Amino acid sequence: MHLFFILLVGCRSKKSDPIEVQVSVTDTPHRLDVWKEATVKPSPDCKDCIKIKSSVAHAGEIESTFYPLLDDAIAQWGDCMESILSCVEADKSPPACVEESKCPAECLGLYRQKVQGVATKGEQLQLILSIFNDEDAPCLPKEEP
């Protein structure tokens, strides 16, 4: 789950060097309960699933199953992250991308509060990871049982 958004730190910012900064949200509760309850559960027969085959270097062919109707916390988080990532890739500012995202209001408010005084784009991107993607991120969905 964390691998998906790690791509954001490597976003191209007109330079080829990767961005490396440290931003912390340690004064924030461990996990916020911000994701809606799922309204759709996967069917046991997976009749609405989509199979996706792809080739991955050094791993060979991989088949993934995608359930487009699923709307659990992890699916909502994925929509949130995708909305930020696609915006950042369009070269908009990270704060603007978070504001325009499909993320929960509490997470947007936390980012808004923490981004004050964060000057560089690299630090703003790292703050997104700290809030949404790091292992102890407050807006990362709780582990499913």
Image (spheres, helix red, strand yellow):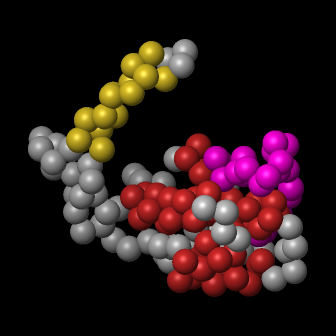
Give the residues drawn in magenta, as a range: 6-26
Q: Residue at x 43, y 22 (%)?
A: 55
106 in the magenta segment: no
Q: Main secondary structure of the magenta part?
A: loop
Residue 116, above or below 51: below
In the depicted view, which residue is nearer to us: 119 or 142? Answer: 119
Q: Residue at x 21, y 51 (%)?
A: 42
Q: Position of residue 60 (x, y in %)?
A: 45, 16
Q: Position of residue 30 (x, y in %)?
A: 65, 67
Q: Quadrant of residue 92?
A: bottom right
In the depicted view, which residue is nearer to us: 18 or 4? Answer: 18
Residue 114, above or below 39: below
Residue 42, above or below 71: above
Q: Position of residue 78 (x, y in %)?
A: 46, 58
Q: Position of residue 37 (x, y in %)?
A: 33, 71
Q: Residue at x 51, y 65 (%)?
A: 83
User: Visible in this render: residue 82?
Assistant: yes
